[in-house]
């Protein structure tokens, strides 16, 4: 069964460092998303991406964050200068069209020290 | 804005017990409503959905009915199994985003 894959599964970084989280969405999907979950809190929407541009972003997704689809298969989330409060589980998701039926990866846990 | 509130966990049940996890929503318009499940070590998976009032979503023995009059979408299962142990998330769509509740952890014991 096709699945969304994310790398790395866990990354530890120092505050102020740049981090890139990678995702390979399901191949025939057109919509891509990043969500995050800070430990003990709700899953929060960061950004959605369609047709090579951001279609919607939340207040969390400020200038420190960016997304890119560098080739036909990868979808990346970059955090330019990490802060302690960026420590969270980051989930990538994809969908064929926007109906709310998303397929999620297993997540990348980011720990900022 | 659109949001969901779901009951706090953890919920611990014996196998074959009846499950209810409450979810209420606040929304402008008529969003679609979803239940997602996260098994240990895995990503979130869609469990069921309902797109309009009075719709009932169902899957794997779980059910939820979209109740406009009570703004609710409670998840139910008549007889839980150990394999149902997971975290359950209620959600609604708002533009391109899904707004999730905090999640309810369910532990089913033999």
Image (cartoon, coloured by chain):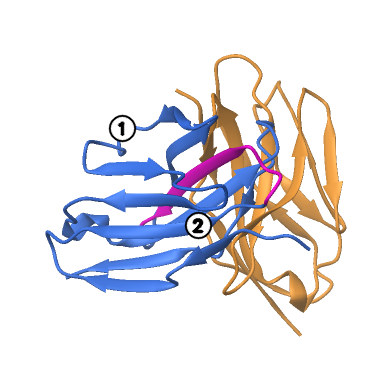
Residue at the front extreme, as displayed: A71
- Chain A: give its colour: blue
The image shows residue B107, relative to residue A4, as above or below, that is: below
Q: Where on the picture, by quarter, is residue B86?
A: bottom right
Residue A72 located within the stretch drawn in magenta: no
Mark 1 Cα within 10 Å, few/some/many (few <14, many 20+)? Answer: few
Q: How many marks?
A: 2
Identify the magenta region.
Answer: A27-38
User: If you read the primary sequence from the N terminus, does the residue marked by circle 2 or circle 1 appear first?
Assistant: 2
Q: Residue furthest left?
A: A16
Residue in the image at 87% along x and 57% along y: B61
Say whether residue A113 is left or right of residue B13.
left
Camera-side residue of B107 and A75: A75
Q: Can residue A73 be seen by looking at this rendering?
A: yes
Write the residue at 85% across / 46% down.
B58
Q: Residue at x 22, y 55 (%)?
A: A85
Q: Residue under circle 2? A: A23
Q: Which residue is mark 1?
A: A59
- Looking at the picture, how far across and down is residue B99, in whole percent? 51, 37
Secondary structure state at the residue bearing disc 1: loop
């Amino acid at each position: 069964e096709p699945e969304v894959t994310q790398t790395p599964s866990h990354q530890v970084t120092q505050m102020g460092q740049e981090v890139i989280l990678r995702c390979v969405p399901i191949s025939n999907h057109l919509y891509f998303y990043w969500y995050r979950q800070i430990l003990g809190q709700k899953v929060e929407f960061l950004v959605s991406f369609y047709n090579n541009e951001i279609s919607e972003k939340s207040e969390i997704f400020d200038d420190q964050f960016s997304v890119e689809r560098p080739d036909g298969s990868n979808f990346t989330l970059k955090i330019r200068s990490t802060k302690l409060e960026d420590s969270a589980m980051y989930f990538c998701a994809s969908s064929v069209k926007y109906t709310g039926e998303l397929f999620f990866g297993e997540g990348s846990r980011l720990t900022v020290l | 804005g659109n949001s969901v509130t779901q009951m706090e966990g953890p919920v611990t049940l014996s196998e074959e017990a009846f499950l209810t996890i409450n979810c209420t929503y606040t929304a402008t318009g008529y969003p679609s409503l979803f239940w997602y499940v996260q098994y240990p070590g895995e990503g979130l998976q869609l469990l069921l959905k309902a797109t309009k009032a009075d719709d009932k979503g169902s899957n794997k023995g779980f059910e939820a009915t979209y109740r406009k009059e009570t703004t609710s979408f409670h998840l139910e299962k008549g007889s839980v199994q150990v394999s149902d142990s997971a975290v359950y998330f209620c959600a609604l769509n708002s533009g391109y985003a899904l707004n999730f509740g905090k999640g309810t952890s369910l532990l089913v014991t033999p």
